Image (cartoon, rainbow, N blue to C red):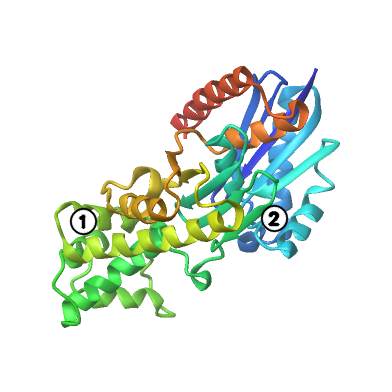
């Protein structure tokens, strides 16, 4: 029996799955992150090689198509590097390589046409037009102005706390929240994290929820941070949409990533929706409920079916949701 292989390779973890042609999940494995930009080409190849060999061995059959959604596949040069990494370890005659944001786009749409806006540990925005063209905005880190991600929210929240402390801005409860979370006597002491011989380590990702917490208490500084990030995210989404679609078209905009999926104050998403709808009145917003790995399985199945039939998609969705949930509960 032949199968398809899908890999969702992120910065912190890599999930690989095999599925039969009817969407039934055959095997699922988890490995560490595989972004070569952070861990190097050699280690990225080792991580991907382990994931692929394990999941294919469990399937005990032949791979017909493989889809790899890999973090760090941004520039043409990145694609060249990742293809070289994958060629010796890819078991399938057909290999699809996309940025991992496109997995979210396919998971949140019927055919992969539309735009995916991701705000999680990092940010990205990628769209695919009806003609197959791909367009991207931001997604390369702070130098491309990435916002609406956990690190950027925490960073701007800390700046707001600093401004409130020295008088450049209004006092904000963010100062107390950050001090308590980090065990600091003064908010200024946070700069020690950058000292060469300091033992202070700051997990910026864990601080982002405090910005939402402060916003829920009506803190003006926190609300301002969320609104500014909503403006930046809308700008990225609109840049992609304008490059692929006419303003009157019905365009799905998939929102993914922990910040956009789970942020506990609505202002960030509401700002995005308001600004995008002004220019694309027929946009449909879809907060991603499925694991992006589903998108990889569906893209691989699309290569066999054209577009995977609805019943095949539904089966893959249900089985991936169940097995990913079981896997995460065991960690």
Q: Position of residue 79 (x, y in %)?
A: 74, 57
Where is residue 110, by image quadrant?
Answer: top right
**First reached walking from the N terminus: tag 1 or tag 2:** 2
Q: Is residue 309 visible?
A: yes
Label count reads 2
Judge depth for marks 1 and 2 and give the one in front.
1
Q: Which residue is mark 1?
A: 215
Quarter of the figure with the N terminus: top right
Where is residue 68, by image quadrant?
Answer: top right
Where is residue 304, by image quadrant?
Answer: top right
Numbered disc 2: secondary structure = helix
Q: Residues within 10 Å of mark 2 (few under 14, many from 20)?
A: some
- For the point 26% across and 58% down, the residue is 211
Q: Position of residue 178 (x, y in %)?
A: 24, 63
Give the side of residue 27 with respect to residue 138, left or right: right
- For the point 35% across and 43% down, the residue is 262
- For the point 76% across and 33% down, the residue is 303
Q: Position of residue 20 (x, y in %)?
A: 71, 21
Q: Residues within 10 Å of mark 1 (few under 14, many from 20)?
A: many
User: Foreground residue, 291 or 266?
Assistant: 266
- Indicate whether 69 appears above or below 81: above
Measure the alpha-carbon separation of dots 1 and 2. 41 Å
Farthest front residue in view:
248
- Indicate whether 136 appears above or below 259: below
User: Foreground residue, 329 or 252?
Assistant: 252
Confirm or deny contact between disc 1 and disc 2 (CB under 8 A): no
Q: Which residue is mark 2?
A: 43
- For the point 56% across and 44% down, the residue is 114
User: Foreground residue, 47 or 37?
Assistant: 37
């Amino acid at each position: 029996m032949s199968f398809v292989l899908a890999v969702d390779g992120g910065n912190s973890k890599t999930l690989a799955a095999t599925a039969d042609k009817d969407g039934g999940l055959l095997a699922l494995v988890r490995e560490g992150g595989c972004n070569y930009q952070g861990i190097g080409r050699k280690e990225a190849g080792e991580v991907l090689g382990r994931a692929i060999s394990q999941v294919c061995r469990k399937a005990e059959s032949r791979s017909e198509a493989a889809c790899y959604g890999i973090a760090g596949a941004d520039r043409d040069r990145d694609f060249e590097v990742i293809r070289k990494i994958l060629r010796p370890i890819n078991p399938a005659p057909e290999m699809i390589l996309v940025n991992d944001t496109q997995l979210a786009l396919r998971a949140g749409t019927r055919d992969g046409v539309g735009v995916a806006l991701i705000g999680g540990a990092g940010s990205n925005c990628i769209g695919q037009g009806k003609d197959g063209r791909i367009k991207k905005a931001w997604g390369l880190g702070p130098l491309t102005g990435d916002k609406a991600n956990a690190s950027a929210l925490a960073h701007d929240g800390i700046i707001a706390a600093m401004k409130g402390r020295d008088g450049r801005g209004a006092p904000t409860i963010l100062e107390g929240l950050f001090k308590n979370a980090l065990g600091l006597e003064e908010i200024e002491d946070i700069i020690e994290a950058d000292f060469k011989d300091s033992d202070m380590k700051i997990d910026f990702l864990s601080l982002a929820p405090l910005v939402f917490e402060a916003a829920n208490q009506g803190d003006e500084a926190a609300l301002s941070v969320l609104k500014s990030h909503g403006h930046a995210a809308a700008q990225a989404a609109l840049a992609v949409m304008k490059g692929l679609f006419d303003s009157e078209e019905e365009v799905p905009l998939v929102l993914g990533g922990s910040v956009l999926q789970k942020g506990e104050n609505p202002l960030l998403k509401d700002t995005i929706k308001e600004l995008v709808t002004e220019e694309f009145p027929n946009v449909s917003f879809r907060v991603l409920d499925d694991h992006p790995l589903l998108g990889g399985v569906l893209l691989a199945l699309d290569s066999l079916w054209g577009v995977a039939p609805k019943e095949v998609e539904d089966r893959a969705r249900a089985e991936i949701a169940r097995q990913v949930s079981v896997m995460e509960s065991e960690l």
